[in-house]
Image: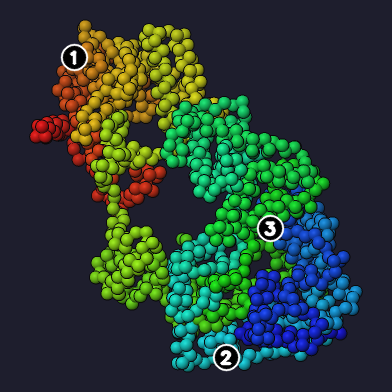
């Protein structure tokens, strides 16, 4: 029998060099020797590099090669040794296995009860794959999962359903199907282990074979069985263990090395039971330690403390060494931690002679650090190898493919369509250039920018008009939208001959031809082979492959090799996944949903290959991955109490109780991993391993805040620091908490990294009102010198940055008058609402009408669209009345209904309101809106029975291009040499004749409650009806003013009080109540005696049912009535003109201060969509609020004073 020998020695001992020397000796003694060096798969490359370096040292040459020394993993061992006729060449990746399990779940869905609801979840599929692989590796057969055992253990009576028993029965069912499926397909990963064992047992050709097993401290049942077969047939086998020979033979409790100790004991007992020779342990004691004394001492201290052994003594010399070799730190955030580590690495390389390849960075949760580590390291020009397989799920191709197939699944939704369109791998071909390859790089970038611009316009039209679902792909559904006739402006700002409709139609047709029609080629059911071919053809047709090739080549030309490899790998994973799908389902009949589910169950498992470093780089890796050799310097990040020890997260579908019951019925060659006990021991061993991960310097740190969660230092690390009297330094935003800390640029890395912390330091001195320290002055001087020497690296002068630290929260104030004129123009055409908005807040006006920032229109019902519908309906209705020379108050019911229906049909044909026809819910809402409009117009009819007015004009436009149907507006000269034109639209102008005298009133419809406010008018916030009245009086010069009013369209419900005691006059009283509750809101401008002639209800009750006035006993208006005298009206209208001109002058002078009024709820600059721009914080900038300090009784005096002052100023200017 061939012997096994364990190679023992503490983890701190360099056993690998001794192993390689042994291999060289074997080759010298027996040139025909075939040597396998077996390590974990992820260490294979690093081990090959290390072996090569060691051989070069031994042979003292750079040309040494590993002749017959093969570095292998368990999987590669079978590949190397099996003859071709015994190898199973078919294999499935994790992607393929996920697809296989997804299919099994679909096939057996009807037989599942407990897991039926889980079959579509990717997480459940991943758990099943993991469990099935563990069961297979444990030599567990489906019949070993006998549900009867669990029934007995759980005392389950016959015919009584038990959820736990049913769950385990379903696992057994699915595992049975899984084993059958993999055996039918002769998969290498499932057959080559057994094939190699059979081959080893049937052949006698291995007398020259040797095996060294390293970095394996635990073996599953499959690996153990294979190892035993190798031991039987090879010349000799060596297995390394990270424990001394004394520890291996000890029966004492050894928590730190319990896992390798149990493995050692298990293998040794199996060999002895099989009569296999086991030599005495080869216990290696390194003469020359590869670690500094302090590094090794602290690791040993931790080991002995955990094993409750006698602790080593510490002396003064060792204390000083520990202070130089070990550094413990707490940071306030991950960003601060990474910034500090990046700067420290920069200092080590710049000042202490280390190379980047000498430095290792470890963390447990690499996903936590991955988004931030690259920019922080890049600012210090630190080359980085991030040893972590990233998921491909967010690669543009994967997003595009998912969006593509989801278009068919979910009937062309917005989100799925945008995944296609906003993706640079899917671009419309140029009508002139054709193929992408004919573009030069600068031409291509220009074309890409233009496509982005066109897609933005296309998207705006889609979301504004709801062109999704059948409204998108149904070619018989015509697109008709408001902006269709506008000329398209390209990304350079040049007008084109193409209209927006032509652009949108071209994009639509491109998508129909490239995507919709190929998607429709899917048959209801296809074979797996047909489905795979269909998808590949669709992707080829789309042009995505050619575009990915172009992007890859562009990355290569820029030197970004990693990016180019990612594009290649994603395409290869797509092809491999289709190949595996074809292999699994070639002849299976499959529907589209199943095809999608299976395909993406696999694709979501895809990850990028890790390309090992070949240049001088810092390695950033997972702390649980053992390293071939210790690095000189190691940074251990995120060493908090959640990561070290990591709390066991048990995710297996088998509980520990399940595992224990299964284990009772297993044979010696079968076993499952004991998750909990192994995990607890591994955490201690991992800490010991981490303490030996550096030979010279070890930095251990954590961030105390992870989002909103507060964490503490790892208890293992904290205890080590305390027991060895080493400080745990605390850092906040990179600066030590001590404000008097001595600073130098070595704390802050290169210039790009220095800016933020140095400016924070400057701000700190400013806020604390401290004198700037000399060392900070020196730092600023050195930074200024660097700027002068490297002008190309500096984006903004240091002086400007320092100034900005004191003014970064200042609110916007003014812009240059020249800039304002360029933005707004020399001639201003403003509506009343824009003027009011300017007075509400100048900066809001600047954002909306200077920069013209606005949110995109959405195909949804909102207050603005509701208001547009109400206004247009009323306009159409009143226009029909005027055109047919009818009077509202004299309409019969039939005439009224006929006009109402005609108006409703006219608006239905208007594309602005096709929103209401898109969904049944919106149609129901429109029905309710029409009912409210019907009631409102009927209400207006009732009002006109009370007041003998007729509508002179509806939707009266003024101040725009002069047409016969438009009214004259107002024009004012401006100091800039330009002029201000006031424009707008009056909802309704009514007229009436009393005693041969003409009066008019203006009406502005409001869907909400609106009252005229005299104080607001003074501040320029309520000028609308004043303007409308002034325009009406200008254009109807024969008329006098009756008043100006807001009229609410939507009437609220009214509570009928207890005063109504009988039903005799109920209808009349309700009618009176309704009129009284919905009076016009505004002001009247005629004396009370004249209004009594106009409104008969005043005579009867002293309270108008139409106007906002009530009479006193003497016949005059009471104090609550809103009525102005002729002189007051004159003042109001003159003041309105004055406010218009003042606003225009201030706009052109560049006055754009952020000055909102307190309690004005709808100031745009304070709303969410604009607040991100303004940055307004009421807690810091409360003083920016304006207050309405003028009282109502003071308004007219204040207006007269300002008008008088203005006249004086004009005289002085003249």
Residue 840 relative to residue 480: left or right: left
The mark nearer the N terminus, 2 or 3, is 3
Q: Quadrant of residue 339?
A: bottom left
Q: Which residue is located at x 27 percent, y 27 percent?
A: 982
To which quarter of the image does residue 828 belong? top left
Please say which color scheme the image uses: rainbow
Residue 628 is situated, as x and y percent measured from the top left of the image, at 63, 77
Q: Residue at x 86, y 74 (%)?
A: 200
- The residue at 32%/63% (across/down) is 798
On-image quarter of the N terminus: bottom right
Q: Secondary structure at mark 3?
A: helix
Secondary structure beneath disc 2?
A: loop
Q: Earlier along the polypeptide chain: callout 2 or callout 1?
A: 2
For residue 1089, the mark is 1
Of 301 and 796, nearer the camera is 796
Q: Position of residue 359 (x, y in %)?
A: 53, 75
Q: What is the number of the mark on residue 126?
A: 3
> Which of these two is toward me, 1028 or 38?
38
Q: Earlier in the sequence, mark 3 or mark 1?
A: 3
Q: Is residue 530 above or below residue 973?
A: below
């Amino acid at each position: 029998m061939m012997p096994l020998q364990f190679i023992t020695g503490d983890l701190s001992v360099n056993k690998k060099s001794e192993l390689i020397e042994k291999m060289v000796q074997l080759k010298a003694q027996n040139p025909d020797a075939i040597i396998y060096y077996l390590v974990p798969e992820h260490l294979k490359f690093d081990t090959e590099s290390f072996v090569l370096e060691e051989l070069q040292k031994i042979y003292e040459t750079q040309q040494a090669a590993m002749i017959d020394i093969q570095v292998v993993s368990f999987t590669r061992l079978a590949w190397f040794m099996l003859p071709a006729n015994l190898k199973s060449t078919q294999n499935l990746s994790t992607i393929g296995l996920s697809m296989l399990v997804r299919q099994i779940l679909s096939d057996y869905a009807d037989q599942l009860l407990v897991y039926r609801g889980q079959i579509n979840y990717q997480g459940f599929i991943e758990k099943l794959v993991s469990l099935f692989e563990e069961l297979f590796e444990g030599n567990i057969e489906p019949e070993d999962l006998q549900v009867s055992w669990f029934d007995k253990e759980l005392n389950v009576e016959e015919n009584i359903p038990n959820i736990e028993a049913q769950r385990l029965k379903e696992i057994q069912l699915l595992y049975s199907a899984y084993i059958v499926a993999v055996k039918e397909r002769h998969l290498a990963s499932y057959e080559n282990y057994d094939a190699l064992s059979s081959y080893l047992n049937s052949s006698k050709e291995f007398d020259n074979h040797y095996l060294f097993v390293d970095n394996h401290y635990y073996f599953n049942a499959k690996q153990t069985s294979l190892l035993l077969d190798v031991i039987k047939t090879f010349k000799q086998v060596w297995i390394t263990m990270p424990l001394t020979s004394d520890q291996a033979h000890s029966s004492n409790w050894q928590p730190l090395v319990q896992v390798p100790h149990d493995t050692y004991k298990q293998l040794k007992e199996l060999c002895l039971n099989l009569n296999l020779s086991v030599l005495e342990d080869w216990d290696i004691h390194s003469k020359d330690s590869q670690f500094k004394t302090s590094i090794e001492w602290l690791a040993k201290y931790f080991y002995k403390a955990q094993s409750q052994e006698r602790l080593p003594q510490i002396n003064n010399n060792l204390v000083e060494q520990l202070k130089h070799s070990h550094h413990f730190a707490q940071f306030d955030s991950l960003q601060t931690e990474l910034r500090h580590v990046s700067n420290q690495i920069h200092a080590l390389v710049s000042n202490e002679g280390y190379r980047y390849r000498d430095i290792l960075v470890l963390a447990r949760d690499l996903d936590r650090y991955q988004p931030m580590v690259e920019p922080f390291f890049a600012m210090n020009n630190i080359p980085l190898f991030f040893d972590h397989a990233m998921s491909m799920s967010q690669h543009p191709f994967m997003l595009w493919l998912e969006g593509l197939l989801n278009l068919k699944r979910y009937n062309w939704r917005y989100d799925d369509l945008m995944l296609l369109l906003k993706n640079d791998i899917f671009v419309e071909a140029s009508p002139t250039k054709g193929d992408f390859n004919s573009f030069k790089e600068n031409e291509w970038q220009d074309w890409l920018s233009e496509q982005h611009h066109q897609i933005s316009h296309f998207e705006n039209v889609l979301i504004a008009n709801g062109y999704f679902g059948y409204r998108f792909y149904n070619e018989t559904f015509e697109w008709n939208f408001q902006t269709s006739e506008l000329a398209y402006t390209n990304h350079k700002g040049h007008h084109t001959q193409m209209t927006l409709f032509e652009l949108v139609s071209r994009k639509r047709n491109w998508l129909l031809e490239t995507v919709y029609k190929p998607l429709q080629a899917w048959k209801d059911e296809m074979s797996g082979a047909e489905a795979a071919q269909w998808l590949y053809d669709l992707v080829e047709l789309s042009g995505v492959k050619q575009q990915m090739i172009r992007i890859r080549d562009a990355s290569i030309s820029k030197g970004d090799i990693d990016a180019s490899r990612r594009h290649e790998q994603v395409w290869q994973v797509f092809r491999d996944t289709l190949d595996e799908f074809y292999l699994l389902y070639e002849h299976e009949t499959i529907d589209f949903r199943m095809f999608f589910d299976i395909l993406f169950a696999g694709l979501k498992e895809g990850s990028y290959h890790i390309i090992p470093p070949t240049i001088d780089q810092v390695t950033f890796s997972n702390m649980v991955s053992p390293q071939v050799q210790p690095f000189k310097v190691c940074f251990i990040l995120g060493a908090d109490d959640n990561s070290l020890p990591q709390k066991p997260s048990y995710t297996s579908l088998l509980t520990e109780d399940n595992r224990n019951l299964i284990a009772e019925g297993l044979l010696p060659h079968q076993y499952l991993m004991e998750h909990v006990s192994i995990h607890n021991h591994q955490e201690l061993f991992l800490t010991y391993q981490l303490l030996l991960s550096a030979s010279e310097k070890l930095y251990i740190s954590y961030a105390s805040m992870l989002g909103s969660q507060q964490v503490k230092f790892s208890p293992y690390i904290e205890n080590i620091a305390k027991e060895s009297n080493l400080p745990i330094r605390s850092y906040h935003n990179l600066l030590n908490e001590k404000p008097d800390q001595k600073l130098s640029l070595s704390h802050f890395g290169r210039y790009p990294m220095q800016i933020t912390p140095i400016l924070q330091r400057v701000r700190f001195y400013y806020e604390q009102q401290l004198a700037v320290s000399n060392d900070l002055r020196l730092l600023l001087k050195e930074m200024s010198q660097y700027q002068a020497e490297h002008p190309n690296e500096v984006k903004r002068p240091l002086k400007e940055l320092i100034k900005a630290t004191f003014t970064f929260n200042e609110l916007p104030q003014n812009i240059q008058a020249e800039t304002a004129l360029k933005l707004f123009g020399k001639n201003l055409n403003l509506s009343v609402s824009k003027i009011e908005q300017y007075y509400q807040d100048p900066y809001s006006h600047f954002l909306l009408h200077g920069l013209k920032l606005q949110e995109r229109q959405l195909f949804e019902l909102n207050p603005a669209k509701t208001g547009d519908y109400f206004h247009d309906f009323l306009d159409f209705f009143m226009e029909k009345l005027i055109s047919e020379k009818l009077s509202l108050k004299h309409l019969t019911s039939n005439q009224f209904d006929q006009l109402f229906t005609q108006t409703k049909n006219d608006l239905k044909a208007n594309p602005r309101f096709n929103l209401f026809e898109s969904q049944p819910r919106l149609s129901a809402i429109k029905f309710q809106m029409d009912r409210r409009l019907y009631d409102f117009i009927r209400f207006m009819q009732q009002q006109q029975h009370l007041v003998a007015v007729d509508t002179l004009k509806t939707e009266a436009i003024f101040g725009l291009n002069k047409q016969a149907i438009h009214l004259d507006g107002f024009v004012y000269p401006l100091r800039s040499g330009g002029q201000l034109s006031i424009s707008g639209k009056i909802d309704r102008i009514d007229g009436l004749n009393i005693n041969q005298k003409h009066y008019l009133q203006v009406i502005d419809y409001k869907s909400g409650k609106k009252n005229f406010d005299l104080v607001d008018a003074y501040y320029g916030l309520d000028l609308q009806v004043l303007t409308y009245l002034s325009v009406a009086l200008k254009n109807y010069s024969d008329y006098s003013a009756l008043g100006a009013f807001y009229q609410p369209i939507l009437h609220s419900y009214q509570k009928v009080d207890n005063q109504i005691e009988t039903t005799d006059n109920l209808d009349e009283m309700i009618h009176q109540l309704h009129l009284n509750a919905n009076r016009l809101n505004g002001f009247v401008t005629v004396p009370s005696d004249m209004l009594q002639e106009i409104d008969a209800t005043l005579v009867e009750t002293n309270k108008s049912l139409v106007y906002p006035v009530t009479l006193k006993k003497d016949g005059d208006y009471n104090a609550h009535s809103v009525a102005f005298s002729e002189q007051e009206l004159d003042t109001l209208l003159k003041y309105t003109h004055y406010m218009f001109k003042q606003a225009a002058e201030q706009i052109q002078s560049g006055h754009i201060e952020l000055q909102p009024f307190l309690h004005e709820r709808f100031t745009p600059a304070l709303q969410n969509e604009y607040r991100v721009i303004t940055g307004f914080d009421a807690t810091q900038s409360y003083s920016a609020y304006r207050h309405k300090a003028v009282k109502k009784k003071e308004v007219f005096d204040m207006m007269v004073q300002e008008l008088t002052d203005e006249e004086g100023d004009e005289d002085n200017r003249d």
